[in-house]
Protein backbone atom coordinates (compact mmCIF):
# COMPACT_ATOMS: atom_id res chain seq x y z
CA UNK A 1 0.00 0.00 0.00
CA UNK A 2 2.83 2.36 0.92
CA UNK A 3 4.63 1.57 -2.33
CA UNK A 4 1.43 2.28 -4.26
CA UNK A 5 1.06 5.63 -2.48
CA UNK A 6 4.68 6.50 -3.31
CA UNK A 7 4.14 5.58 -6.96
CA UNK A 8 1.02 7.75 -7.12
CA UNK A 9 2.91 10.70 -5.55
CA UNK A 10 5.78 10.23 -8.04
CA UNK A 11 3.33 10.12 -10.96
CA UNK A 12 1.61 13.30 -9.73
CA UNK A 13 4.96 15.05 -9.27
CA UNK A 14 5.98 14.10 -12.84
CA UNK A 15 2.64 15.29 -14.16
CA UNK A 16 2.81 18.71 -12.54
CA UNK A 17 6.48 19.28 -13.36
CA UNK A 18 6.11 18.30 -17.02
CA UNK A 19 5.17 21.80 -18.30
CA UNK A 20 8.35 23.24 -16.72
CA UNK A 21 10.50 21.07 -18.96
CA UNK A 22 8.25 21.31 -21.98
CA UNK A 23 9.05 23.52 -24.96
CA UNK A 24 7.35 26.90 -25.42
CA UNK A 25 3.77 26.51 -26.65
CA UNK A 26 3.22 26.85 -30.40
CA UNK A 27 1.64 30.31 -30.14
CA UNK A 28 4.72 31.81 -28.42
CA UNK A 29 7.15 30.07 -30.75
CA UNK A 30 5.26 31.29 -33.81
CA UNK A 31 5.21 34.83 -32.42
CA UNK A 32 8.98 34.75 -31.98
CA UNK A 33 9.46 33.74 -35.61
CA UNK A 34 6.97 36.26 -36.95
CA UNK A 35 8.11 39.26 -34.87
CA UNK A 36 10.57 41.39 -36.87
CA UNK A 37 13.74 42.49 -35.09
CA UNK A 38 13.87 46.22 -34.44
CA UNK A 39 17.55 46.46 -35.37
CA UNK A 40 17.28 44.63 -38.64
CA UNK A 41 17.51 46.56 -41.87
CA UNK A 42 16.90 45.49 -45.45
CA UNK A 43 20.36 43.89 -45.73
CA UNK A 44 19.97 42.08 -42.48
CA UNK A 45 16.57 40.90 -43.57
CA UNK A 46 18.10 39.48 -46.74
CA UNK A 47 20.74 37.64 -44.73
CA UNK A 48 18.24 36.51 -42.11
CA UNK A 49 17.83 32.84 -41.53
CA UNK A 50 15.00 31.23 -43.49
CA UNK A 51 11.71 30.99 -41.61
CA UNK A 52 11.53 27.99 -39.33
CA UNK A 53 9.44 25.07 -40.35
CA UNK A 54 6.39 25.17 -38.08
CA UNK A 55 4.75 22.05 -39.44
CA UNK A 56 5.83 20.02 -36.40
CA UNK A 57 3.67 22.22 -34.19
CA UNK A 58 0.67 21.20 -36.23
CA UNK A 59 1.63 17.57 -35.68
CA UNK A 60 1.86 18.19 -31.93
CA UNK A 61 -1.72 19.38 -31.58
CA UNK A 62 -3.66 16.60 -29.87
CA UNK A 63 -7.10 15.67 -31.10
CA UNK A 64 -10.01 16.07 -28.71
CA UNK A 65 -11.07 12.47 -29.31
CA UNK A 66 -7.72 11.10 -28.11
CA UNK A 67 -7.85 13.23 -24.97
CA UNK A 68 -11.43 12.13 -24.28
CA UNK A 69 -10.53 8.47 -24.76
CA UNK A 70 -7.43 8.78 -22.57
CA UNK A 71 -9.39 10.55 -19.80
CA UNK A 72 -12.17 7.94 -19.72
CA UNK A 73 -9.74 5.02 -19.91
CA UNK A 74 -7.56 6.32 -17.08
CA UNK A 75 -10.60 7.08 -14.92
CA UNK A 76 -12.09 3.60 -15.31
CA UNK A 77 -8.69 1.97 -14.91
CA UNK A 78 -8.25 3.77 -11.57
CA UNK A 79 -11.73 2.81 -10.36
CA UNK A 80 -11.30 -0.76 -11.66
CA UNK A 81 -7.97 -1.14 -9.84
CA UNK A 82 -9.57 0.00 -6.59
CA UNK A 83 -12.54 -2.36 -7.01
CA UNK A 84 -10.25 -5.28 -7.92
CA UNK A 85 -7.95 -4.70 -4.93
CA UNK A 86 -10.90 -4.37 -2.54
CA UNK A 87 -12.56 -7.57 -3.82
CA UNK A 88 -9.28 -9.52 -3.62
CA UNK A 89 -8.70 -8.27 -0.06
CA UNK A 90 -12.27 -9.22 0.87
CA UNK A 91 -11.89 -12.73 -0.50
CA UNK A 92 -8.66 -13.12 1.49
CA UNK A 93 -10.14 -11.82 4.74
CA UNK A 94 -13.28 -13.98 4.31
CA UNK A 95 -11.13 -17.10 3.95
CA UNK A 96 -9.11 -16.09 6.99
CA UNK A 97 -12.30 -15.44 8.97
CA UNK A 98 -13.68 -18.90 8.19
CA UNK A 99 -10.45 -20.52 9.35
CA UNK A 100 -10.23 -18.39 12.50
CA UNK A 101 -13.90 -19.00 13.38
CA UNK A 102 -13.40 -22.77 13.12
CA UNK A 103 -10.32 -22.64 15.35
CA UNK A 104 -12.09 -20.46 17.93
CA UNK A 105 -15.15 -22.78 17.86
CA UNK A 106 -12.92 -25.78 18.54
CA UNK A 107 -11.31 -23.99 21.48
CA UNK A 108 -14.37 -22.38 23.05
CA UNK A 109 -17.16 -24.68 21.97
CA UNK A 110 -18.82 -21.90 19.91
CA UNK A 111 -19.17 -19.30 22.68
CA UNK A 112 -16.84 -16.56 21.37
CA UNK A 113 -17.83 -16.12 17.72
CA UNK B 1 -25.30 -0.84 26.88
CA UNK B 2 -21.83 -0.13 25.51
CA UNK B 3 -19.81 -3.15 24.38
CA UNK B 4 -16.05 -3.57 24.08
CA UNK B 5 -14.49 -3.02 20.63
CA UNK B 6 -13.58 -6.72 20.44
CA UNK B 7 -17.12 -7.90 21.24
CA UNK B 8 -18.50 -5.37 18.77
CA UNK B 9 -16.10 -6.54 16.03
CA UNK B 10 -17.07 -10.18 16.65
CA UNK B 11 -20.64 -9.32 15.66
CA UNK B 12 -19.69 -7.91 12.22
CA UNK B 13 -21.90 -9.80 9.71
CA UNK B 14 -20.06 -11.80 7.04
CA UNK B 15 -22.96 -11.85 4.54
CA UNK B 16 -22.80 -9.61 1.47
CA UNK B 17 -25.07 -6.52 1.69
CA UNK B 18 -27.96 -6.87 -0.79
CA UNK B 19 -28.63 -3.11 -0.78
CA UNK B 20 -25.10 -2.52 -2.12
CA UNK B 21 -25.72 -4.90 -5.04
CA UNK B 22 -28.93 -3.05 -5.84
CA UNK B 23 -27.12 0.30 -5.66
CA UNK B 24 -24.37 -1.10 -7.89
CA UNK B 25 -26.93 -2.10 -10.53
CA UNK B 26 -28.56 1.36 -10.39
CA UNK B 27 -25.17 3.11 -10.57
CA UNK B 28 -23.87 1.05 -13.49
CA UNK B 29 -27.09 1.45 -15.49
CA UNK B 30 -27.07 5.23 -14.89
CA UNK B 31 -23.42 5.47 -15.96
CA UNK B 32 -24.14 3.41 -19.09
CA UNK B 33 -27.07 5.69 -19.99
CA UNK B 34 -24.91 8.76 -19.29
CA UNK B 35 -22.14 7.44 -21.59
CA UNK B 36 -24.66 6.70 -24.32
CA UNK B 37 -26.24 10.16 -23.91
CA UNK B 38 -22.83 11.88 -23.99
CA UNK B 39 -21.80 9.94 -27.10
CA UNK B 40 -24.98 10.38 -29.09
CA UNK B 41 -27.00 13.37 -27.84
CA UNK B 42 -24.63 16.05 -26.55
CA UNK B 43 -23.09 18.50 -29.05
CA UNK B 44 -19.32 18.88 -29.52
CA UNK B 45 -17.72 22.19 -28.64
CA UNK B 46 -16.60 24.30 -31.62
CA UNK B 47 -13.19 25.10 -30.08
CA UNK B 48 -12.51 22.13 -27.79
CA UNK B 49 -14.03 19.44 -29.98
CA UNK B 50 -14.66 16.08 -28.34
CA UNK B 51 -12.41 16.87 -25.36
CA UNK B 52 -15.21 19.06 -23.97
CA UNK B 53 -17.05 15.80 -23.17
CA UNK B 54 -14.44 15.05 -20.48
CA UNK B 55 -16.31 17.67 -18.45
CA UNK B 56 -19.27 15.40 -17.55
CA UNK B 57 -17.32 12.77 -15.64
CA UNK B 58 -14.68 15.28 -14.50
CA UNK B 59 -17.28 17.27 -12.55
CA UNK B 60 -18.90 14.04 -11.31
CA UNK B 61 -15.50 12.97 -9.97
CA UNK B 62 -15.10 16.37 -8.30
CA UNK B 63 -18.46 15.94 -6.52
CA UNK B 64 -17.52 12.41 -5.40
CA UNK B 65 -14.13 13.61 -4.19
CA UNK B 66 -15.43 16.62 -2.26
CA UNK B 67 -18.28 14.66 -0.66
CA UNK B 68 -16.04 11.67 0.11
CA UNK B 69 -13.30 13.73 1.72
CA UNK B 70 -15.78 15.87 3.68
CA UNK B 71 -17.54 12.74 4.99
CA UNK B 72 -14.15 11.23 5.89
CA UNK B 73 -13.36 14.40 7.78
CA UNK B 74 -16.64 14.28 9.75
CA UNK B 75 -16.26 10.57 10.60
CA UNK B 76 -12.64 11.17 11.67
CA UNK B 77 -13.82 13.92 14.00
CA UNK B 78 -16.45 11.55 15.46
CA UNK B 79 -13.74 8.90 15.94
CA UNK B 80 -11.43 11.43 17.61
CA UNK B 81 -14.10 12.66 20.03
CA UNK B 82 -15.58 9.22 20.78
CA UNK B 83 -13.38 6.36 19.51
CA UNK B 84 -15.48 3.86 17.62
CA UNK B 85 -14.42 1.14 15.16
CA UNK B 86 -17.39 1.80 12.90
CA UNK B 87 -16.59 5.52 12.62
CA UNK B 88 -12.95 4.69 11.92
CA UNK B 89 -13.91 2.16 9.22
CA UNK B 90 -16.30 4.67 7.63
CA UNK B 91 -13.69 7.45 7.73
CA UNK B 92 -11.12 5.23 6.03
CA UNK B 93 -13.64 4.05 3.40
CA UNK B 94 -14.73 7.60 2.55
CA UNK B 95 -11.11 8.77 2.43
CA UNK B 96 -9.95 6.00 0.09
CA UNK B 97 -12.91 6.44 -2.27
CA UNK B 98 -12.34 10.22 -2.13
CA UNK B 99 -8.72 9.68 -3.17
CA UNK B 100 -9.73 7.40 -6.07
CA UNK B 101 -12.03 10.11 -7.42
CA UNK B 102 -9.52 12.88 -6.76
CA UNK B 103 -7.02 10.93 -8.89
CA UNK B 104 -9.72 10.68 -11.59
CA UNK B 105 -10.18 14.44 -11.26
CA UNK B 106 -6.45 15.17 -11.42
CA UNK B 107 -5.98 13.07 -14.56
CA UNK B 108 -9.12 14.04 -16.50
CA UNK B 109 -8.67 17.77 -15.70
CA UNK B 110 -5.20 18.15 -17.26
CA UNK B 111 -6.33 16.20 -20.35
CA UNK B 112 -9.18 18.69 -20.80
CA UNK B 113 -6.80 21.61 -20.08
CA UNK B 114 -4.34 20.47 -22.78
CA UNK B 115 -6.90 21.43 -25.40
CA UNK B 116 -8.56 24.34 -23.58
CA UNK B 117 -5.47 26.11 -22.17
CA UNK B 118 -2.69 24.64 -24.34
CA UNK B 119 -0.97 23.06 -21.32
CA UNK B 120 -1.61 20.20 -18.96
CA UNK B 121 -1.10 22.04 -15.71
CA UNK B 122 -1.01 25.55 -14.32
CA UNK B 123 -0.51 26.57 -10.69
CA UNK B 124 -3.88 28.27 -10.30
CA UNK B 125 -5.61 28.15 -6.87
CA UNK B 126 -8.23 25.45 -7.45
CA UNK B 127 -5.82 23.03 -9.14
CA UNK B 128 -3.08 23.57 -6.57
CA UNK B 129 -5.48 23.10 -3.66
CA UNK B 130 -6.94 19.94 -5.21
CA UNK B 131 -3.44 18.51 -5.58
CA UNK B 132 -2.53 19.40 -1.99
CA UNK B 133 -5.72 17.87 -0.57
CA UNK B 134 -5.10 14.69 -2.57
CA UNK B 135 -1.54 14.48 -1.25
CA UNK B 136 -2.85 15.03 2.31
CA UNK B 137 -5.36 12.19 1.89
CA UNK B 138 -2.71 9.88 0.39
CA UNK B 139 -0.47 10.69 3.37
CA UNK B 140 -3.24 9.66 5.79
CA UNK B 141 -3.77 6.38 3.90
CA UNK B 142 -0.02 5.68 3.90
CA UNK B 143 0.19 6.53 7.61
CA UNK B 144 -2.68 4.16 8.46
CA UNK B 145 -1.19 1.46 6.29
CA UNK B 146 2.22 1.74 7.98
CA UNK B 147 0.96 2.09 11.55
CA UNK B 148 -1.15 -1.09 11.45
CA UNK B 149 -3.33 -1.41 14.56
CA UNK B 150 -1.46 1.31 16.47
CA UNK B 151 -3.77 3.55 18.50
CA UNK B 152 -1.47 6.56 18.01
CA UNK B 153 -1.39 6.03 14.24
CA UNK B 154 -5.18 5.91 14.20
CA UNK B 155 -5.50 9.18 16.16
CA UNK B 156 -2.84 11.04 14.16
CA UNK B 157 -4.44 9.84 10.92
CA UNK B 158 -7.88 10.97 12.10
CA UNK B 159 -6.52 14.39 13.13
CA UNK B 160 -4.95 14.83 9.69
CA UNK B 161 -8.12 13.65 7.92
CA UNK B 162 -10.21 16.26 9.80
CA UNK B 163 -8.40 18.91 7.70
CA UNK B 164 -9.98 17.50 4.52
CA UNK B 165 -13.39 19.17 5.03
CA UNK B 166 -12.16 22.79 5.35
CA UNK B 167 -9.74 22.15 2.48
CA UNK B 168 -12.61 20.82 0.35
CA UNK B 169 -14.58 23.97 1.09
CA UNK B 170 -11.58 26.07 0.03
CA UNK B 171 -11.43 24.13 -3.27
CA UNK B 172 -15.12 24.90 -3.77
CA UNK B 173 -14.68 28.66 -3.25
CA UNK B 174 -11.12 28.99 -4.65
CA UNK B 175 -12.14 30.56 -7.98
CA UNK B 176 -14.51 33.03 -6.29
CA UNK B 177 -11.98 34.13 -3.66
CA UNK B 178 -8.67 34.02 -5.52
CA UNK B 179 -9.61 33.90 -9.22
CA UNK B 180 -7.79 31.66 -11.68
CA UNK B 181 -8.39 30.04 -15.05
CA UNK B 182 -10.74 27.34 -13.86
CA UNK B 183 -14.20 27.71 -15.48
CA UNK B 184 -17.23 27.96 -13.22
CA UNK B 185 -19.96 26.22 -15.15
CA UNK B 186 -22.39 25.39 -12.35
CA UNK B 187 -21.90 28.54 -10.25
CA UNK B 188 -21.49 30.75 -13.32
CA UNK B 189 -24.90 30.48 -14.96
CA UNK B 190 -25.32 26.75 -15.48
CA UNK B 191 -25.51 24.62 -18.63
CA UNK B 192 -27.69 26.08 -21.36
CA UNK B 193 -28.37 23.01 -23.55
CA UNK B 194 -31.01 20.60 -22.23
CA UNK B 195 -29.18 17.54 -23.63
CA UNK B 196 -25.96 18.63 -21.95
CA UNK B 197 -27.82 19.18 -18.67
CA UNK B 198 -29.31 15.67 -18.80
CA UNK B 199 -25.92 14.12 -19.61
CA UNK B 200 -24.30 16.08 -16.78
CA UNK B 201 -26.80 15.02 -14.10
CA UNK B 202 -26.84 11.40 -15.31
CA UNK B 203 -23.04 11.30 -15.01
CA UNK B 204 -23.10 12.95 -11.57
CA UNK B 205 -25.86 10.69 -10.17
CA UNK B 206 -24.25 7.58 -11.70
CA UNK B 207 -20.81 8.37 -10.31
CA UNK B 208 -22.13 9.28 -6.85
CA UNK B 209 -24.17 6.05 -6.68
CA UNK B 210 -21.14 4.05 -7.78
CA UNK B 211 -18.98 5.89 -5.22
CA UNK B 212 -21.51 4.94 -2.49
CA UNK B 213 -21.18 1.28 -3.49
CA UNK B 214 -17.39 1.57 -3.29
CA UNK B 215 -17.69 3.07 0.22
CA UNK B 216 -20.03 0.26 1.36
CA UNK B 217 -17.72 -2.40 -0.13
CA UNK B 218 -14.59 -0.94 1.44
CA UNK B 219 -16.41 -0.43 4.78
CA UNK B 220 -17.38 -4.11 4.82
CA UNK B 221 -13.79 -5.06 3.98
CA UNK B 222 -12.39 -3.02 6.89
CA UNK B 223 -15.07 -4.32 9.31
CA UNK B 224 -14.25 -7.91 8.31
CA UNK B 225 -10.57 -7.16 8.99
CA UNK B 226 -11.57 -5.82 12.42
CA UNK B 227 -13.55 -9.03 13.06
CA UNK B 228 -10.56 -11.14 12.01
CA UNK B 229 -8.36 -9.15 14.40
CA UNK B 230 -10.87 -9.66 17.24
CA UNK B 231 -10.94 -13.41 16.52
CA UNK B 232 -7.13 -13.52 16.55
CA UNK B 233 -7.15 -11.80 19.95
CA UNK B 234 -9.79 -14.24 21.29
CA UNK B 235 -7.76 -17.18 20.02
CA UNK B 236 -4.55 -15.87 21.60
CA UNK B 237 -6.34 -15.28 24.93
CA UNK B 238 -7.72 -18.85 24.96
CA UNK B 239 -4.36 -20.36 24.04
CA UNK B 240 -2.66 -18.36 26.82
CA UNK B 241 -5.32 -19.48 29.33
CA UNK B 242 -4.89 -23.12 28.29
CA UNK B 243 -1.11 -22.89 28.63
CA UNK B 244 -1.45 -21.43 32.14
CA UNK B 245 -3.93 -24.12 33.12
Image (cartoon, coloured by chain):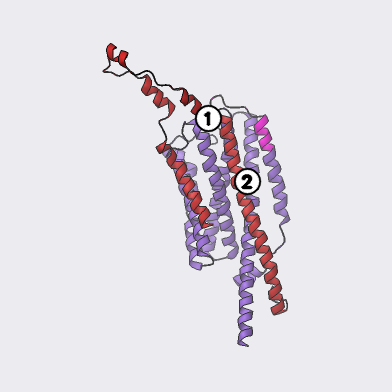
Chain colours: A red, B purple
x then y, percent, for residue B144? 52, 61
Mark closer to the observer (2, 1): 1
What chain is tagged by disc 2?
A: B
Outermost residue, bottom side = B245
In the image, what residue occupies the spot 50% across and 30% down? B116
x then y, percent, for residue B31? 67, 41
Tell which of B108 and A51 is nearer to you: A51
In the image, what residue occupies the spot 54% across and 46% down? B103
Q: Is residue B41 magenta?
A: yes
Residue A64 sits above or below residue B109 on the image: above
Q: Is residue A52 magenta?
A: no
Tell me if I can see residue B1 in this picture. no
Q: Secondary structure at mark 1?
A: loop
Q: Which residue is mark 2?
A: B208
x then y, percent, for residue B183? 50, 34
User: Label 2: how many residues lie within 10 Å, few (<14), some (14-19) or many (20+)?
Assistant: many
In the image, what residue occupies the spot 37% across and 18% down? A50
Left-right relation of B231 to A30? right
Q: Which residue is mark 1?
A: A62
Dividing the picture into quadrants, the one containing residue A51 is top left
Q: CA separation, marks 2 and 1?
A: 30 Å
Q: Which residues are magenta?
A: B33-47
Tell which of A52 and B50 is nearer to you: A52
Amino acid sequence: MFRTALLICAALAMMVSAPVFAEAPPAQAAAKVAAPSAKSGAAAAAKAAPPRDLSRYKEESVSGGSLLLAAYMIMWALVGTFVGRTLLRQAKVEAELTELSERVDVLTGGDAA
Amino acid sequence: MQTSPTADALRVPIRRPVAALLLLAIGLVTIEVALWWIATRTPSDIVLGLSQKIFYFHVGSAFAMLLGLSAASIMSLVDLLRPDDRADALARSFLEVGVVFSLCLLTSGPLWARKAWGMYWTWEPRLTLSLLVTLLAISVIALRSMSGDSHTGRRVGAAMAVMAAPASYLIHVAVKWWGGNHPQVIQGGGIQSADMRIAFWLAVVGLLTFASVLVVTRYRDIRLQQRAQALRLTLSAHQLRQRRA
